[in-house]
């Protein structure tokens, strides 16, 4: 399955620290809801059925708006959480692969290729 999503907000806008731990901001929750809806539409179009207890691989290609340093780890955490219960039952089954990053000032985005993990039975 292929999915194109917007770049997530910076980690400074995603998390708040309180006396009882770390919390997602409204901006983070809205982003996750948005990519979940995009994924649901694409899953229907592309015939993807939600996996349960099955490994999947997500290949990430980033198209940044500029040349600033960015942390792909923060992006993946928020994305994986946002796609949970839409494409897979739990993000513990996701194997992440950063494939490339490029600059696209006119259309910054993240392109995902999502496949079921094939194991060899040797």
Image (spheres, rainbow, N blue to C red):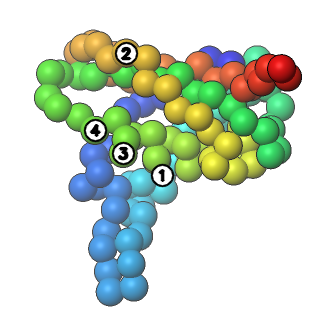
Foreground disc of the pair 1, 4? 4
Q: Residues within 10 Å of mark 2 (few under 14, many from 20)?
A: few
Find the distance from the CA under tag 4 to the CA under tag 3.
6 Å
Q: Point out the tag, 2 or 3, that comes first from the N-terminus.
A: 3
Find the distance from the CA under tag 3 to the CA under tag 1.
16 Å
- Which quadrant of the rendered structure holds the N terminus? top right
Find the distance from the CA under tag 2 to the CA under tag 3.
16 Å
- Which quadrant of the rendered structure holds the C terminus? top right
The reply to whether the C-beta atoms of the residues labelled 4 and 3 are less than 8 Å apart is yes
Q: Nearer the viewer, residue 36 or 63?
A: 63
Mark 3: secondary structure: helix
Mark 2: secondary structure: strand
The residue carrying mark 3 is 74
Report whether residue 38 is seen: no
Left or right of 64 in this view: 47: right
Report whether residue 25 is seen: yes
Left or right of 40 in this view: 19: left
Q: Residue at x 37, y 22 (%)?
A: 62
The residue carrying mark 1 is 30
The residue carrying mark 4 is 71
Find the distance from the CA under tag 4 to the CA under tag 2.
13 Å
Q: Point out the tag, 1 or 4, that comes first from the N-terminus.
A: 1
The residue carrying mark 2 is 100
Find the distance from the CA under tag 1 to the CA under tag 2.
26 Å
Horizontal and vertical percent for residue 98? 43, 24
Q: Residue at x 37, y 41 (%)?
A: 73
């Amino acid at each position: 399955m292929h999915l194109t999503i917007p770049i997530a907000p910076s980690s400074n806008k995603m998390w708040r620290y309180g006396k009882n731990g770390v919390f997602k901001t409204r901006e983070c929750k809205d982003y996750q809801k948005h990519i979940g809806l995009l994924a649901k539409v694409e899953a229907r179009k592309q015939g993807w059925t939600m996996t349960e207890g099955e490994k999947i691989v997500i290949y990430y290609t980033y198209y940044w708006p500029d040349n600033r340093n960015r942390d792909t780890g923060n992006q993946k955490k928020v994305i994986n959480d946002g796609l949970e219960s839409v494409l897979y039952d739990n993000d513990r089954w996701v194997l992440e692969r950063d494939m490339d990053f490029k600059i696209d000032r006119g259309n910054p985005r993240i392109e995902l290729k999502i496949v079921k993990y094939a194991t060899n039975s040797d």
